[in-house]
Image (spheres, helix red, strand yellow):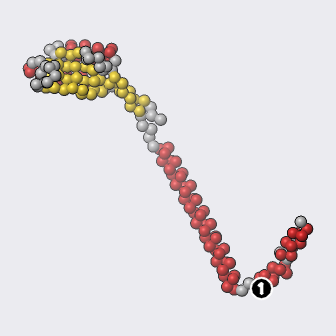
Amino acid sequence: MAFDMILLKKAFSPKTLVKAGTSFDNSMLVVIVSCWMAAVVAMGLAAFAVNGAVEWQSKRDKAMLSEPILPNIRDSLLGAKELSEIEERLKLQFPNLTIAKSSRGSAGELTIKANIWDLFQQWIYAIGYVDSMNAQYKWELKEFCAGDCKSGRGLMYVSLVGKSISIEKGR
């Protein structure tokens, strides 16, 4: 340890530093100054880049916070009770049409039939009425036939699948 201290004192003594300074010529001094200038410029550019990255991250975070939360829309097949209520309401409104819940056991399915061409307008109105009677219900057209139906279900037949729509708060 004592040897190291003596060596350090000798290396950094004023006499050694003056000797080192006089032994450097001007070209060596230009090279050293240029290296230090390049290092300072590089540090400045790095600080500028880091500052820009932090600023962009802050803007991104603000944008993420201002983005709206979208709701979740869920649908489920109508139950037997809801279908029965709709069926009874349609039977009162359109007594000349054959209106029934599906006999094939499909949940949420409603059929509207007519076997006389004179009932075509009522049949079309009934389909539109079903679609517009409740905003929380969505109806999908499963089968539709107007004319020579190959299925043997009559002249005019429509099968609708009803779904209840619920809107939940998004995350």
* Mark 1 crowd level (few <14, some 14–19, many ≥20, 10 Å Cα): few
Residue drawn at x 17%, y 13% is 95
Nearest to the observer: residue 102 or residue 22: 102
Asked if residue 89 lies left or right of residue 124, the reply is right
Asked if residue 152 lies left or right of residue 53, the reply is left
Asked if residue 73 lies left or right of residue 132, the reply is right
User: Which residue is disc 1 drawn over?
Assistant: 22
Residue drawn at x 69%, y 82% is 29
Whether residue 121 is visible here, answered yes or no, is: no
Q: Secondary structure at mark 1?
A: helix
Percent position of residue 161, x then y: 28, 24
Asked if residue 7 lies left or right of residue 121, the reply is right
Residue drawn at x 33%, y 14% is 81
Residue drawn at x 50%, y 43% is 65
Which quadrant: the N terminus?
bottom right
Percent position of residue 156, x then y: 14, 22
Percent position of residue 106, x then y: 29, 19
Q: Amino acid at mark 1?
A: Thr
Percent position of residue 38, x then y: 62, 73
